[in-house]
Amino acid sequence: MTVKTKKPTPTADGSDDDPLLLRQPTMSDGAAVYKLIQACPPLDLNSNYVYLLLCTHFASTCIVAHQNHQLVGFISAYQHPEKQNTLFVWQVAVHESMRGRGLAQYMLEHLLKRSTLEHIKFIETTVDPENHASRRLFQKLAQQHQTELVELDFFQSEHFVKPQVEPLLRIGPLRTHLL
Ligand SMILES: CC(C)(COP(=O)(O)OP(=O)(O)OC[C@H]1O[C@@H](n2cnc3c(N)ncnc32)[C@H](O)[C@@H]1OP(=O)(O)O)[C@@H](O)C(=O)NCCC(=O)NCCS
């Protein structure tokens, strides 16, 4: 389903824009998602094939945002294989020109409002401790839902090829009726 939002999203030059279109991805989005992730460091760039799988097999738990016929946002997520009520959010990307306007949170909320995801009560994700924008996004999500955000050890430096840590953030229980 495509959702047309009325949220104002002015461009950097202040000109009028088409409305944002938020929807499930399709196979046709795979290459553009790859290019968006490539343009969004520090995200790890996965293969074009991985993004095709996300845009097809995992489309019901992923979301794309388009404006003026361009892909400006993407979230990949999947239902945790052992916790039915938990959505694991993998990558969140917003085009540089659209940052700081709440688009990432808006996409997350749209995802959570899908009738097929009504049973989701917790969000899990991992965040680089240095990625302040990403941390703020999940802190704001917890605030919006008036719920807890807990941080737990997860992927440690020895699990990566390059030194890096990715603690787990668990947000919930979600209160989607507050949205
Ligand atoms: C993280 C990211 C998805 C947030 O998207 P967004 O739509 O800009 O999110 P928000 O508008 O809610 O802003 C979140 C935080 O980003 C920071 N921010 C604000 N404007 C910004 C800008 N122009 N550029 C970068 N970060 C900005 C602020 O800390 C903000 O928190 P605040 O509202 O409390 O000030 C986006 O910055 C991005 O794509 N970054 C690169 C990829 C990445 O790191 N992804 C997250 C890892 S999964």
Image (tube, helix red, strand yellow):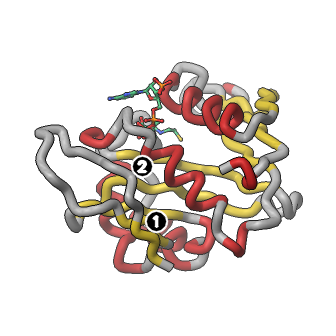
In the image, is 170 to the left or to the right of 8?
Answer: right
Mark 2 element type = loop
Q: Nearer the viewer, residue 138 or 88?
A: 138
Callout 2 amino acid:
Leu
Q: Which mark is residue 51?
A: 1
In three-dimensional space, the C-alpha distance between marks 2 and 1, rounded to whole angstroms, equals: 10 Å
Q: Ligand 1 closer than 8 Å to the CB at disc 2?
A: no
Residue 95 appears left or right of 125? left
Query: Percent from the top left, x then y, of residue 66?
Result: 32, 63
Does residue 47 sit above or below 40 in this rendering?
Answer: below
- Report the residue at 35% width, 41% height from top: 40
- Of the four image quadrants, the one with ligand 1 is top left
Disc 2 target residue: 45
- Dot 2: few (<14), some (14–19), or many (≥20) neighbours within 10 Å? some
Q: Nearer the viewer, residue 30 or 48?
A: 30
Residue type, label 1: Tyr
Q: Would you say 146 lies left or right of 92 here?
A: right
